[in-house]
Image (cartoon, rainbow, N blue to C red):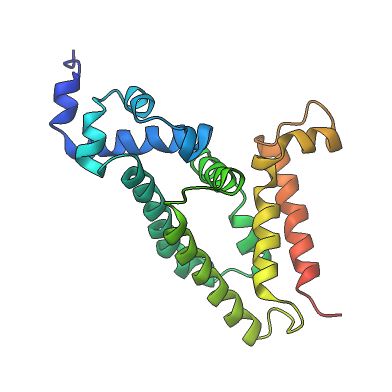
Amino acid sequence: MAARRTPQTRQRDPERTRSRILRAATAEFAAKGYAGARVGEIADRAGVNKQLISYYFGGKEGLYRTIAQTWLDEQREAEPVHREMDLPSLAVDFIARNETMRENTRLLAWEGLTGGEDPGGPARTAVLQGALTELKRRQAEGEIPQELDVGHLLLVCMAAAAAPVTMPHVARSIFGPETDTTSEEFLDRFSEQFAMIVRRMTTKG
């Protein structure tokens, strides 16, 4: 029988402890936003002493910045794959199909709705400026009509891709009270229609 892991044991396993804290913090920030999240509650979720959050991340702000940087790193790692996708497929790739993606989308929504402190701003700006550069490349190569402003195209596509996460109540009003925007059936249909919309927006004639 495996020995039970105590809080002291977890503290002696830095990488595992950091990962637990990051997972717990992402869930807490996604549920309550940066302003509403509490370090003590994040520590409780992770099953660690809250002092470890200061030790590993320098506190709440540093923890949030680390989450944002992780998102930036993941996007950079995905760039070679994304460059090979056509635009409709790329747009659909950002639709939340797993809990991590949904949590990141909720984080973006909280940042926009609450205002105030924005510790994730620099990493988010880096990601989106990179996406803007990629869209400009695609436009120069003829994939996107010249009359489209790629910045507005990016904003519209991001808002649309986030809709299943940010507006499930609106979806229920449109499609019926039993609609589950996290279900595979809904996301498959939504992805199909979203790809069609992006294709129509970016096709001449």
Q: Quadrant of residue 19?
A: top left
In percent of width and height, residue 196 lies at: 78, 61
Which quadrant does the N terminus fall into? top left
> Is 69 in front, or is 50?
50
Residue 22 to residue 69: above or below: above
Residue at x-position 46% and y-position 40%: 34
Q: Say which residue appears at 18% left-offset and 18% top-offset.
A: 6
Query: Residue at (19%, 38%) from the top-left corner?
Result: 55
Between 149 and 13, which is closer to the camera in this rendering?
149
Residue 30 in the figure: left or right of residue 20:
right
Please tell me which residue lies in front, 1 or 119: 119
- Asked whether, in this view, residue 110 is left or right of residue 22, the answer is right
- At horizontal 78% and vertical 75% (from top left) the residue drawn is 203
The image shows residue 170 at horizontal and vertical percentages of 78, 37
* Residue 185, quarter of picture: top right
Q: Residue furthest front?
A: 116
In the rendered view, tell whether residue 106 sits above or below residue 52.
below
Q: Is residue 145 above or below residue 44?
A: below
Residue 53's place in the image compared with 43, above or below, is below
Q: Quadrant of residue 40?
A: top left
Question: Which residue occupies the foreground of this view, 17 or 68?
Answer: 68
Q: Position of residue 128 (x, y in %)?
A: 53, 65
Left or right side of 78 for 165? right
